[in-house]
Amino acid sequence: MTKRKLKLWEALAVSLGLVGPTLAMSGNGQGIIGMVGKAVPLVFFLGFLGVMLVAFGFIRLTRRYNHAGSAYALVGATMGPRLGFIAGFALFGCYLFFLICTASIFGAFVNSFLGHFGSAQIGFGISAAVCLALAGWLNTRDTSTVSRLLLTIEGFGITFMVILVAVIFAKGGAESTGFDTSTFTSGGVSMSTIAAAVVAAVLSWAGFESCAALGEETDNPRHNIPRALFGSVLITGALFVIVMFAQTIGFGTDKEGLAKFQGSGNTLGDLGTSYVGNWFGILVVLTAVASAFACNLASVTSSARLMMALARDGFGSPKLAKVDPVHHSPVNAVWLMVAIGIVVNLVSWLAKWPVMGTGNAAIDSYFFFAVVGSVCLLFAYLLVEFAVFAAARSGQISVKAWELLWPALGSVFILVILYFNLKGQSGISPAFVALAWVLVGVVIALAAGNLAKRIGESLTRELDNADAGHSELIE
C-alpha cells in the first residue's frame, strides 16, 4: 500500500495554486466589463453560487472514491468506463490548456513588472518556456515540496489583496463614484448577458477540484479531499466577490473608471500604485508573476497525474505511467506536458496567434486557451453532477432525497453556461476548439471497446485496493 503523505492543507494548496487567486483577480475581470459594465461583482457572486453547486458533486463522490484520475475515476466508477473516459479526456484537456495559458500570462506579467523599470520587454514565448521548464523540474520533486511552494506564493498574494481591499474601502473608492453598491444589481443589463458573462467568472474558479487528483497521495483522503474541495471554493469565492467589488469601485463605476478597469494590464498592480504607492504596485505585480507561475506549476501537476492515470489504464504509452521511486512523481508524464506547453507557446508567440482584441499578444493567448480549458472543464463537471445521481441510484453512496437538489441545480447551471458560451460562436473560437476536443474523447470512447473494458477492470481493481487501504488506516 502506498504511504499517504499529503495533509489537508497540502491538498488545499494544490487547489488554491491551480485556481491562482492573485492571477485570477489581476487578469480575469477586464474581459467582463465590456459585457456587463459595473455589474462585475454581481457576475462573480452568481459564479460563486454556481461553483458551490458544482462542488457538491465532487465532495459527495470523493467521500467514497479517491483516485489519481479525479473526474475520470468518479464518473467511471459510477456510470461506466466509457463515460469515465470522456470525463477524464475533457478534464485532461482542461489541465493541458491551462498549463499553456498560465505560461502565457506569466510572460505578460513579467513584462508588466519590467515596465516599471524601463522599456525592456521579453517575448512571452521565451518567458513561457522558462516558466514551464522550471515548473517541470519542481514537479519531479516531492509533491509536498510543490504544495508548500504553492501555498507560500498564494499566501503572499492573498495578504496583499486584503491590504489593498482595506485601503480602497477606507478611502471610499474612487472620488467620482464612491462606495457604489449598485454593482450588485444588473443595472439594466439583460439576464442573458449576465449569464453569458458568468462564463468568464467561472474561469476564476477553474481548477478547484484539482486536489481530487491527489486522492492516492493524501492522508485520510475520504475526509481531507472533500474538506480541501469545500475550503478552496469557499475561500476563493468570498475573496473573489469582495476583491472584485473593491476593484470596481476602486477604478470607479462611471464610464472613465470602467474604461481604466478594462484597459488595465494588471488591475491589482494599477490599483496598488494608485491607492498605496508605486512601491506597493510593484510588489503586487511581482506577486502576480509568482501567482502565474504557481498556477502553471499546479497545472503541470494535475495534467501529468491525469496523464499517468490514463496511461496506467491503457490509454497512452506505459512509460507515461512510470512513477519516480524517490519522489513519487510521474516524471515522464510531467516532461511530456511541459514539452507540449513550450511548443504551443513558442508557436503562438512567433505566429502572433490567436488574436482576441486585447492588444497584448500574451494576454490574447492567455484568454484563448483559458476559455478552451474552461469549456472542457464544464463538460467534465457536468458528467460529475450526473455521476452523483448514478451513484445514489445504484447505492454506491447514501444521500437524502433533498440533497439531490444540489447536483440538479448544478447541472442546470452548467448547461446554461455552456449554451451561452457556444451561442453565436463561429470560426476557430475557444468554445468550438473545446467542443472538438470533447468530441474526440467521445469518438475514442465509443470506438475503442477493448480500451473501455481495460479501463473498467483497472478502475475496479484500483478502487477496491483503495477501499482495502482505507480500511487498514481505520483499523
Image (cartoon, grey):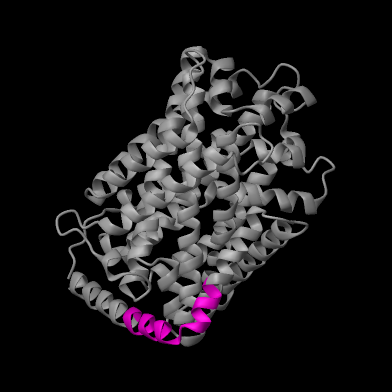
125 lies left or right of 11: right
**Picture layout, residue 40 above or below residue 266:** below
Question: Residue at position x 26%, y 60% from top?
Answer: 217
Q: Position of residue 423 (x, y in %)?
A: 76, 59
Task: From the image, give the main secondary structure of the stretch colored magenta.
Answer: helix
Question: Residue at position x 49%, y 25% from top?
Answer: 111
Q: Position of residue 397 (x, y in %)?
A: 43, 79
Question: Which quarter of the figure has residue 71?
Answer: bottom left
252 lies left or right of 345: right
**Picture layout, residue 457 above or below residue 241:** below
Q: How many marks?
A: 0
Question: Residue at position x 51%, y 13% from top?
Answer: 278
Closest to the observer: 15 or 176? 15
Q: Residue furthest right?
A: 188
Q: Quadrant of the N terminus?
A: bottom left
Magenta highlight on residue 453: yes
Question: Residue at position x 22%, y 49% from top?
Answer: 142
Which residues fall within the magenta stretch?
441-459
**Picture layout, residue 249 above or below residue 327:** above
Q: Position of residue 16 (x, y in %)?
A: 42, 46
Question: Which quarter of the figure has residue 435?
Answer: bottom right
Question: Which quarter of the figure has residue 462?
Answer: bottom left
Magenta highlight on residue 159: no
Closest to the observer: 179 or 142? 142
Q: Quadrant of the C terminus?
A: bottom left
63 lies left or right of 407: left
Q: Position of residue 230 (x, y in %)?
A: 45, 55
**Picture layout, residue 409 above or below residue 105:** below
Closest to the observer: 409 or 116? 116
Residue 67 makes an appearance in the image: no
Residue 56 makes an appearance in the image: yes
